[in-house]
Amino acid sequence: MVDRVAGKVALVTGGASGLGKESALLFAREGARVVVTDINEEGGRAVAEEIGDAAIFLRHDVTREDQWIDAIRQTVDAFGGLHILLNSAGIGLTKTVEDIELEEWQRVHAINLDSVFLGCKHAIPEMAKSGGGSIVTISSVAGIVAGANMAAYNSSKAAVRHLSKSVALHCARKGYNIRSNSIHPAFIDTPILDRHKEKFGAEVALGKFARQIPLGRVGQPLEVAYAILYLASDESSFTTGAELVIDGGISAM
């Protein structure tokens, strides 16, 4: 299949690396024009340049409402509309509820959760003007299955799952033709695993993660990007308020 999102305009946060980058590149290959946003200017510009004329890069702190408003305005100015919002920006933190500091708790929720609220709030009106579309938010299997040492991350990703459902029901009630769904990956070989690779070595670190997964391996970014593409495209036109789990079987245990 080709041109699965042809004619659509996508805004991808956290697009400089990881799942955001992989999805931005895939959207472009499948016919979309893409706005890549990130605080990592060098990485984000490189992704936009790799795509070419069908992409632009915007520096974008997803915790700031003024920058969300500006990013969406520039998206519409550049490409004439907005049909796909991929909320990909996020951070991890491995700390227990006793160890985490309030400032750390607030930062994780600002980036992982508040950003999704702001993105949905300000993107929905423009998406409705454009005839509708799809909001895809990257949560995590950690938003479904908890861990003793992931208090803030679990909380933020579980909240994103339910926020995505609330957005879906709101848009359906208003008749906006906008769908909202969440993606729940497990361990994927992206830069979020780099600190573990640096600590243990890549082979050992990936092996540790693989032993926790029934399929026996870590996932690849493109495996998640294709799931995101499905939810972003019209192929999923009857799917809203759902979560798509891509975890190699972890949540089935």
Image: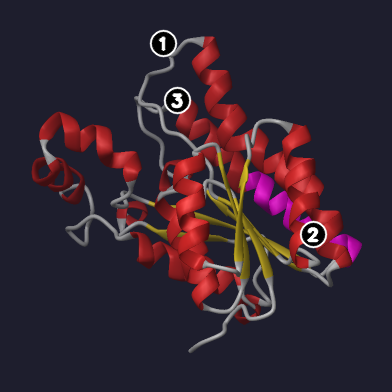
Please, what is the dominant secondary structure of the magenta stretch?
helix
Residue behind mark 3: 151
Residue at horizontal 60 percent and vertical 63 percent from the top: 55
> Please, what secondary structure does the residue beneath circle 2 have?
helix
Q: Does residue 23 appear in this view?
A: no
The part of the chain drawn in magenta is 162-175
Q: Nearer the viewer, mark 1 or mark 2?
A: 2
Q: Earlier in the sequence, mark 1 or mark 3?
A: 1
Residue at horizontal 46 percent and vertical 32 percent from the top: 153
Residue at horizontal 81 percent and vertical 50 percent from the top: 73
Q: What's the amino acid at mark 3? A: Ala
Q: What's the amino acid at mark 1? A: Glu
Image coordinates for residue 65, horizontal then vertical, percent? 76, 33
Q: Nearer the viewer, mark 2 or mark 3?
A: 2
133 sits to left or right of 137: right
Circle 2 packing at 10 Å, graded few (<14), some (14-19), many (20+), is some
Image coordinates for residue 236, horizontal then vertical, percent? 62, 76
Q: How many marks?
A: 3
Q: Does residue 39 appear in this view?
A: yes
Residue behind mark 1: 98
| Residue 171 located within the stretch drawn in magenta | yes
Residue behind mark 2: 76
Residue at horizontal 58 percent and vertical 28 percent from the top: 109
165 sits to left or right of 151: right
Q: Are marks 1 and 3 in contact (CB under 8 Å)?
A: no
Near-viewer residue (242 or 27): 27
Q: What's the amino acid at mark 2? A: Val
Image coordinates for residue 79, horizontal then vertical, percent? 75, 66
